[in-house]
Image (tube, coloured by chain):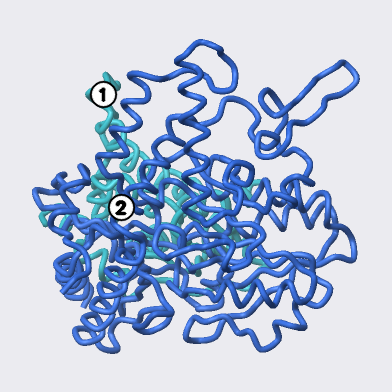
Chain colours: A blue, B cyan
Amino acid sequence: MSSLDVAVLKKEFPLLEQKIHGRDIVYLDSGASSLQPRRVIDAMSTYYETTHANVHRGVYSTAEHATRLYENARITVGKFLGAPDPKSEVVFTKNTTESINLLAQSWGGANLGSGDAIVLSIMEHHANIVPWQMLAARLGFEIRWIPVDASGFLILDDLDQLLEGAKLLSITGMSNVLGTINPIAELAAAAHTHGALIHVDGAQSVPHLPIDVTAADLDFLSFSGHKALGPTGIGVLWGRADLLGAMPPFLGGGGMILDVKTDGFLAAPAPQRFEAGTPPIAEAVGLAEALSFIDDIGIDAIRSHELELTTYALERLDEHFGSRLIVHGPGPGIHRGGAISMTLEGVHAHDVAQILDSYAVCVRPGHHCAKPLMRFLGVPATARASFGLYNEEHDIDVLIEGLDEAAKLFA
Amino acid sequence: MADLEELYREIILDHYRSPRNRGELPSPPAIKTEGFNPLCGDEIVVTIDVNGGVITDIKIGGQGCSISQSSASMMSAAVKGKTVAEARSTIDTFKTLMSVHEAQLEESEGATEPEPVDMAALGELAALQGVVKFPVRIKCATLSWNTLTQALDETSV
């Protein structure tokens, strides 16, 4: 018995009404991007139809209303994350990738140099690797790596050594490939013991797991709107007020200044300091609506539903395919989320995904922007099914039907 | 499923399961080039020996999906023993096969009439024409060919 009434919930997502090759769509790619409920789409349409104006500029009432919506969205996001001071701690960006680039360029640029070190893990998405590598190439600091074991868990035995003298631990809340949920509160405590800050890449975890940045004692957290039932084009960097307040600007332009003269500029306080140019206003409205939607259902109920579904999928796949199908990552249980990366014996992930498409099953083949992890796993590509609150057991059954066809075709 | 069967023809699956000219020639003297499809992680390593304007040997390394691997395998069989000029002509014909269909997909937007492809000249390679119904996979099919082109370009330097 599921914790959610998925049959009813599904009706809220217009894209699920689409047919592919005459079949009902089976959307198993929420790890790449989630679907949007009608409420989110309507909120954005209504904004454009009734309220659109640039924010923080006009004095006419529509502009004031737009500004209020945008700033209210910031507060909604902050509250969703458990931020102590939502008004000044939430920076709107383009996506998680931009959030991490902001953090690297601004905080990293001001705090890291030759002789310094930061700690990442092998299971990071490229978005939490490349910005640091780009910066390290310029500033000459060291990047240390937390390894992963064969079951897909972080190996934390040498964590103290890795954190010794490090200034930052930047780590994913949940692996986009393995589904592994990392113990972020424990990692935060370890980082702080060594005087390091912690940034959590929440792109995969925020939409699916309860989060409280205060309880977990985090310093920074980033996530994307479009993986959390919201629109594309908006992401969030949450940071502790004192840290954001001390960071230099990222992009320069309008909106991020207090004053500009020919001989220089005075930056606005955070979070405006980090939001140069016209921000994604409609997207902020959409994201706030998406998080309200999640709140209305309850993140605990969503987590519980997705956990049941993931367990069902792992058990069914194992039962049906046995050793012919490898799932990379932890077995069923509370330490994993609904990202299931598969290798089907004798069939390349790209072919698996192609054949699944003919069953209207949407999965993602490839390296999932996590090449260091893929190298460690020794696989060039996997086919990943990833769940959202709108998925149900029937979706897994269709997935298995499609995988059967793939196995048959390549037998 | 008809499109799927057209994509995964038996000859393609055969080349995927038993790739021809698999391996890597010692380089030097062989010319070695690598191709990547960053989208899906496919990698192709082409090594060729060219003597007197003739591709005397070719080996294919790397890994990837059935389309990229079978295309590479068929390509190796098609150009081995051929002159560089003949190989270039085969490359052109194959790439036309792939792009002709791209043009046909855009036909509604008033694309010009594509040139006919000499299917007979393609031999086994014609089996790959099913790929063009799956635009995302065209890059898989052409990866090895682009990598071979690079290698041939290096021979003429």
Q: Residues within 10 Å of mark 2 (few under 14, many from 20)?
A: few
Q: Element type at marker 1?
A: loop
Q: Mark 2 points at which residue?
A: A296
Cα–Cα span, label 1 and label 2: 56 Å
* Amino acid on which disc 2 is placed: Asp
Q: Are marks 1 and 2 in contact (CB under 8 Å)?
A: no
Q: Do labels 1 and 2 share a chain?
A: no
Can residue A153 be seen here? The reply is: yes
- Quarter occupied by residue A288: top left
The quarter in which the N terminus of chain A is drawn is: bottom left
- Which chain contains the residue that carries disc 2? A
At x 74% / y 83%, what residue is drawn?
Answer: A160
**Quarter holding the C terminus of chain A?**
bottom left
Q: Which amino acid does label 1 sit on?
A: Glu
Up/down of A83 relative to A290, above or below: below
**Left or right: where does residue A358 sit relative to residue A114?**
left
Q: Position of residue A12 (x, y in %)?
A: 20, 46
Is residue A202 or residue B45 the one in the foreground?
A202
Residue at the (77%, 83%) spot, across then down: A161
| Location of residue A54 with respect to A106 vertically, above or below | above
Q: Name the residue under label 1.
A: B113
Residue B45's spot in the image, x, y percent? Answer: 54, 64
> Which residue is pictured at 66% across the width and 68% down the height?
A120
**Any mark on residue A180, and which?**
none
Q: Is mark 2 on a helix, strand or loop?
A: helix
**In the figure, is residue A252 to the left or right of A66?**
right
- Give how far across and how far down residue A26 sits, in percent: 20, 57
Q: Read off the chain for label 1.
A: B
Marks 1 and 2: which is nearer the front?
A: 2
Q: Which residue is drawn at 47% across and 17% down?
A: A53
